[in-house]
Image: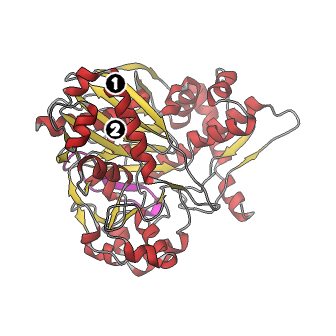
């Protein structure tokens, strides 16, 4: 038996799989995000651990015999979060999350002072990444900075609680901007630029390598007869890639979670900083990946649902089949944007609203707007020389057939739908845990069974191509107007 733990922004998911990777049990515990100031986004690290305890307790209670036989656990987590620990391993402040925008000034300063962020780090210095967050703390909370002994990413804080070890994996750690991504190691120069050194960093392992064992008292609590090994794991998108078998060069997926991602696996480090494409290590050895990232995918639909006092499924269910682009348009920049704009200040908006506009028109516009933003990511990847021929869909938004039909039409590629798309990252984590326990990855990263494939419809693709060209200038118009 093997387990996967996915530390998401809105929830912690746990799954239990058998030797054949059949999902035997799952549990979810919700999380909340604090926004104490406009553009800020934080979470209490202790809330991740409380959620992990909740889901593990639930599975231990419902499947005690199978929990007793667990041999390996893998971890996945939302990337870039700055979790600052003191000498006692306790958090010194709330974690600054991936969608926090407070460090824009620090980003510009770091890029100017240390050009190796763009070469060794392979990415533009954006407020979402960990390095500028630490520079912000250094400048604005010097007392906290001086007390900081370790900086961990969210899933690695959970690892610390599970095993007592300070360890990070290659894929998640590449998103800090402190790594020489090609060399798969920390960079002393990049750390020094933010006043840190290797002593502040966790030990690095590959995603399928052992990182420690579950602490004995936790094994007793959950009825585990042995001490399961905990794998290095991966950042959420790299773990999702492992969950859907996107580990070979050229394989790709689209993730519709809180954020939206176009992910392509590469056989080499392939940065493209001019178009704000992310280039990171993969969770499997000697492999890298590129990502185009938008900050508000299902977050956009969730925002509309809260505003209209409906559930997201009610909104998409009322929309029905889509035969043409929406007359109303939406820019999904609720928290700024990454690819291709690298603009933390830009904000979302509708255009084309009239007296006749209905809630379903707004829903349609939101789905279209997210799809258009993903098209921006596809264009950025194509400029980098990367060709995407088909995608697999993962994340909560992939449950919407209508949304996937729009995305297939906008991107012009077939979209494969896994039978269990919502467990992509958790399943990938479990597979990494299985590899760590068995000492081999042979045959463990197969593609999952599909519930179907959505082919782009020629007429819809043609009409969306024109709609995308009308949508593209709106970013510049909103920027010029100061939004």
Give the labeled residue for mark 1: 61
Find residue 295 and report its horizontal and vertical position in percent.
54, 50
Q: Which residue is mark 2?
A: 5
Image quarter of the N terminus: top left
Image height check: is 121 above or below 398?
below
Pick whichever, 190 or 136, lies toward us.
136
Q: Position of residue 242 (x, y in %)?
A: 29, 37
Q: Position of residue 16 (x, y in %)?
A: 30, 27
Task: Answer whether residue 279 is magenta in the image.
Answer: yes
Q: Is residue 235 left or right of residue 220?
A: right
Displayed quadrant of residue 388: top left
Considering every residue shown, the one lying at the far left of the view is 439
Q: Residue furthest right?
A: 355
Give the mark, 2 or 1, whose residue is nearer the N terminus.
2
Residue 18, above or below 32? above
How far, Cα to Cα, is label 2 from label 1? 17 Å
Q: Is residue 403 left or right of residue 278?
A: right
Q: Which residues are magenta?
A: 267-286
């Amino acid at each position: 038996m093997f387990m996967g733990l996915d530390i998401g922004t809105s929830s912690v998911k746990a799954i239990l799989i058998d030797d054949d990777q059949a999902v035997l049990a799952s549990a979810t515990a919700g999380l909340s995000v604090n926004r104490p100031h406009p553009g800020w986004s934080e979470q209490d690290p202790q809330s991740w651990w409380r959620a992990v305890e909740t889901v593990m307790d639930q599975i231990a209670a419902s499947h005690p015999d199978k929990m007793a036989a667990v041999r390996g656990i893998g971890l996945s987590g939302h990337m870039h979060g700055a979790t600052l620990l003191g000498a006692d391993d306790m958090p010194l402040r709330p974690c600054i999350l991936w969608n926090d925008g407070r460090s824009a000034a620090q980003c510009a300063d770091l890029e100017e002072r240390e050009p190796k962020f763009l070469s060794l780090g392979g990415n533009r210095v954006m407020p979402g990444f960990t390095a500028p967050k630490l520079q912000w703390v250094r400048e604005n909370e010097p007392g906290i900075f001086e007390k900081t002994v370790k900086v961990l990413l969210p899933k690695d804080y959970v690892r610390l609680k599970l095993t007592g070890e300070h360890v990070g994996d290659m894929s998640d750690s590449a998103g800090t901007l402190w790594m020489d991504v090609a060399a798969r190691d920390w960079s002393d120069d990049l750390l020094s630029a933010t006043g840190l050194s290797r002593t502040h960093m966790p030990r690095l392992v590959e995603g399928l390598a052992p990182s420690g064992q579950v602490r004995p008292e936790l094994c007793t609590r959950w009825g585990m007869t042995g001490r399961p090994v905990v794998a290095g794991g991966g950042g959420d998108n790299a773990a999702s890639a492992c969950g859907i078998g996107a580990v070979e060069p050229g394989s790709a997926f689209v993730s519709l979670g809180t954020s939206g991602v176009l992910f392509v696996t590469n056989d080499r480090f392939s940065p493209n900083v001019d178009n704000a494409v992310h280039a990171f290590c993969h969770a499997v050895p000697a492999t890298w990946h590129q990502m185009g990232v938008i900050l508000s995918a299902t977050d956009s639909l969730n925002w509309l649902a809260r505003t209209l006092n409906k559930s997201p499924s009610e909104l998409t269910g009322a929309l029905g089949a889509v035969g043409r682009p929406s007359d109303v348009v939406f820019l999904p920049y609720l928290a700024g944007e990454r690819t291709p704009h690298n603009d933390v200040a830009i904000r979302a908006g509708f255009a084309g609203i009239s007296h006749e506009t209905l809630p379903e028109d707004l829903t349609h516009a939101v789905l279209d707007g997210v799809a258009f933003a993903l098209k921006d990511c596809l264009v950025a990847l194509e400029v980098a020389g990367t060709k995407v021929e088909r995608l697999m869909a993962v994340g909560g938004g992939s449950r919407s057939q209508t949304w996937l039909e729009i995305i297939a039409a906008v991107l012009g590629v077939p979209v494969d739908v896994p039978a269990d798309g919502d467990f992509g990252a958790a399943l990938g984590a479990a597979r990494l845990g299985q590899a760590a326990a068995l000492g081999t990855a042979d045959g463990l990263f197969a593609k999952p069974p599909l519930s179907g494939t959505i082919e782009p419809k020629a007429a819809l693709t043609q009409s969306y191509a024109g709609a995308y060209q009308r949508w593209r200038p709106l970013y510049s118009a909103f920027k010029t107007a100061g939004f």
